[in-house]
Image (cartoon, helix red, strand yellow):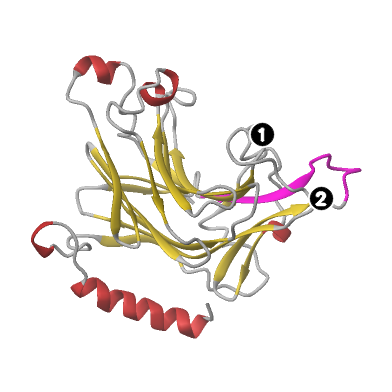
């Protein structure tokens, strides 16, 4: 999206927000919220993402981060979008990774507890694709999955399906994925932009696609369930955007000769006065 169109879109979004409704009794979905963090990705074409807001994720051994590379070739600004790619590695003499993938995060720069997140993004279906918009705790007291993970949006391969999930010791280690239900999906054509939304309040989470509710997850009222790690979500989390590729465990194995891509038009975080956010520069 060109910069001048971005301005027009933002003005339209503000106007629509003043009259947009969802939920009971036509409640304004932005009522009481203030914009506390955003990136419209309007920097110079070919530049890196704003370093005051984003840093490159680090490479480790998990599927999503096994081929991450801190290079502008896989994470850059183009025509008012953040472009994240997974590209063939043309020189494996100095880096043995089969591909190089783009992933950025706000860790140590911006984290928050509770609020509304909206991300306008477009993905490109192809066997092996594995893009994600998600969150992890800024200062985890325990290892994964006990520390908690919030997946705002994921999709895989050529599926026209959006996935929205939370992970914890309760859901992942102990397998209680339906007590309550902790993962949701919806059918959407993914060859176009969608707004992936997430609302996080004390004790409740809700996921949206283009303003339509697709699922919710709540804190248990049973102390025994809580003691087993059902709700590790009362802490500050940071944002992650990444274009990864599969290895066959969920998404299909990547076509290492193909270029995968996700475009992110903007990211916005809103909060109410009683909610908290932290900015560390």
Q: Secondary structure at mark 1?
A: loop
Query: 13 above or below 196?
Result: below
Q: Secondary structure at mark 2?
A: loop
Q: Which mark is residue 18?
A: none
Of all residues shown, which one is farthest toward the right? 93
Is any part of residue 38 visible from this angle? no
Near-viewer residue (29 or 281): 29
Near-viewer residue (77 or 129): 129
Q: Which residue is mark 2?
A: 89
Magenta residue span:
91-105
The reply to whether the C-beta atoms of the residues labelled 2 and 1 are less than 8 Å apart is no
Nearest to N terminus: mark 2 or mark 1: 1
| Residue 161 picture location, percent across and down | 46, 51
| Residue 94 picture location, percent across and down | 88, 43
Q: Residues within 10 Å of mark 1 (few under 14, many from 20)?
A: few
Near-viewer residue (166 or 185): 185
Near-viewer residue (189 or 68): 189
Q: Is residue 151 found inside the magenta-colored segment of the image?
A: no
Q: CA distance from mark 2 to mark 1?
A: 17 Å
Q: Which mark is residue 60?
A: 1
The residue depicted at 30 percent of the width and 45 percent of the height is 215
Query: 47 above or below 86?
Result: below
| Residue 267 picture location, percent across and down | 44, 61
| Residue 109 picture location, percent across and down | 48, 49
Identify the image quadrant of residue 178.
Answer: top left
The residue depicted at 61 percent of the width and 32 percent of the height is 249
The residue depicted at 49 percent of the width and 26 percent of the height is 144
Is any part of residue 24 visible from this angle? yes
Residue depth check, mark 2 versus mark 1: number of the one nearer the observer: 2
Query: 166 above or below 119?
Result: above
Q: Residues within 10 Å of mark 2 (few under 14, many from 20)?
A: some
């Amino acid at each position: 999206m060109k910069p001048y169109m971005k301005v027009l879109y933002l003005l339209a979004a503000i106007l629509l927000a003043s009259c947009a409704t969802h939920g009971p009794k036509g409640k304004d979905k932005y009522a009481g919220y203030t914009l506390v963090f955003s990136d419209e990705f309007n920097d110079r074409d070919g530049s890196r993402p704003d370093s005051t807001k984003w840093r490159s994720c680090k490479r480790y051994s998990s599927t999503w981060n096994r081929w991450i590379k801190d290079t502008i070739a896989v994470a850059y600004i183009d025509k008012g979008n953040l472009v994240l790619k997974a590209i063939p590695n043309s020189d494996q003499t100095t880096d043995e990774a089969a591909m190089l993938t783009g992933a950025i995060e706000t860790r140590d720069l911006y984290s928050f507890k509770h609020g509304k997140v909206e991300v306008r993004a477009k993905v490109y279906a192809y066997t092996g694709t594995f893009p994600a918009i998600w969150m992890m705790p800024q200062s985890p007291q325990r290892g994964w999955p006990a520390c908690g993970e919030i997946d705002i949006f994921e999709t895989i391969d050529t599926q026209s399906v959006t996935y929205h999930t939370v992970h914890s010791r309760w859901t992942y280690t102990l397998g209680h994925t339906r007590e309550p239900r902790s993962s949701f999906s919806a059918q959407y054509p993914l060859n176009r932009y969608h707004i992936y939304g997430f609302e996080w309040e004390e004790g409740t989470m809700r996921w949206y696609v283009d303003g339509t509710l697709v699922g919710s997850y709540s804190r248990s009222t049973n102390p025994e369930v809580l003691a087993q790690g059902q709700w590790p979500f009362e802490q500050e989390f940071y944002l992650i955007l990444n274009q990864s590729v599969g290895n066959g465990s969920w998404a299909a194995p990547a076509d290492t000769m193909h270029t995968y891509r996700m475009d992110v038009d903007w990211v916005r975080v809103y909060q109410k006065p009683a909610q908290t956010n932290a900015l560390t520069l």
